[in-house]
C-alpha cells in the first residue's frame, strides 16, 4: 500500500466520505505547500492533546486543564438538571446548543442502533445512561 492509498483509507473513515472524495483530499494535500501540511498535522495532534471527554455527559470538550473531567455544560450551575436530552453524537449537540431554547442536561449516546438489534450495549452507552439517570434523580 503506497502513501496515496494509505491516506485514502484514512479519509474514507471520515463521516460521509467515500473513496472518490477521500482521493480528492489526498490530491488536494499533494498540491499544498509544506507550511499548510505542517499546520494541518500539528492541529490534528493538538486536537488530541487538548480535548477531554466529560465523565458526566461523554461529550468531547477543550479542557483548560487536562485534569478537568467535567465539561462546561455539566459544570454550569444554571442548567436544569431535571431534564436530560439524549443525543446521538457530539456534532448534533452543537445545533441544539445554538438554538438556545434548551437549558437542561445532555448525554451523548455514542451512536444509534437498528431497532431489531438485540445486544445494544456494545455499541452505545446504555449502562452509562442508566447510571446517569439514577444518579441525577
Ligand atoms: Zn458534560
Image (cartoon, rainbow, N blue to C red):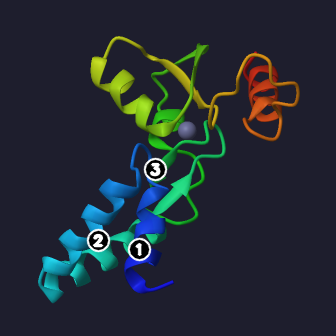
Is mark 1 in CB contact (under 8 Å) with mark 2? yes
Locate residue 128, reporting x and y percent: 77, 35
Judged from the image, the secondary structure of the residue bearing numbered disc 2 is helix
| Residue drawn 62% across the image and 34% down it | 111
Locate residue 127, reporting x and y percent: 83, 32
Locate residue 137, reporting x and y percent: 76, 15
Judged from the image, the secondary structure of the residue bearing numbered disc 1 is helix
Callout 3: few (<14), some (14-19), or many (20+) C-alpha neighbours within 10 Å?
Answer: some
Is the residue indicated by label 3 positioned so its CB lies within 8 Å of ligand 1?
A: yes
**In the depicted structure, whether residue 75 falls above or below residue 65:** above
**In the depicted structure, whether residue 58 falls above or below residue 136:** below
Between 127 and 79, which is closer to the camera in this rendering? Answer: 127
Callout 1: few (<14), some (14-19), or many (20+) C-alpha neighbours within 10 Å?
Answer: some
Disc ID at residue 7: 1
| Residue drawn 11% across the image and 84% down it | 33
Q: Which residue is mark 2?
A: 26
Label 3 vs label 1, nearer the camera: 1
Counting residues from the N terminus, which is met first, the one under dot 2 or under dot 3? 2
- On the question of residue 63 being in view, the answer is no
Q: Which residue is mark 3?
A: 61
Q: Quadrant of residue 64?
A: bottom left
Callout 2: few (<14), some (14-19), or many (20+) C-alpha neighbours within 10 Å?
Answer: some
Between 26 and 62, which is closer to the camera in this rendering? Answer: 26
Is mark 3 in CB contact (under 8 Å) with mark 1? no
- Is residue 102 toward the left or the right of residue 75 in the image? left
Q: CA distance from mark 1 to mark 2?
A: 7 Å
Is mark 2 in CB contact (under 8 Å) with mark 3? no
Between 71 and 16, which is closer to the camera in this rendering? Answer: 16
Amino acid at each position: 500500500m503506497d502513501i496515496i492509498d494509505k491516506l485514502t483509507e484514512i479519509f474514507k473513515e471520515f463521516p460521509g466520505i467515500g473513496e472518490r472524495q477521500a482521493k480528492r483530499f489526498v490530491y488536494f494535500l499533494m498540491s499544498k505547500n509544506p507550511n499548510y501540511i505542517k499546520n494541518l498535522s500539528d492541529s490534528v495532534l493538538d486536537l488530541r492533546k487538548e480535548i477531554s471527554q466529560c465523565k458526566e455527559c461523554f461529550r468531547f470538550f477543550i479542557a483548560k486543564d487536562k485534569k478537568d473531567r467535567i465539561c462546561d455544560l455539566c459544570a454550569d450551575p444554571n442548567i436544569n438538571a431535571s431534564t436530560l436530552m439524549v443525543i446521538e453524537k457530539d456534532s448534533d449537540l452543537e445545533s441544539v446548543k445554538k438554538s438556545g431554547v434548551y437549558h437542561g442536561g445532555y448525554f451523548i449516546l455514542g451512536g444509534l442502533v437498528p431497532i431489531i438489534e438485540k445486544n445494544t450495549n456494545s455499541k452505545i452507552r446504555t449502562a452509562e445512561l442508566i447510571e446517569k439517570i439514577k444518579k441525577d434523580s
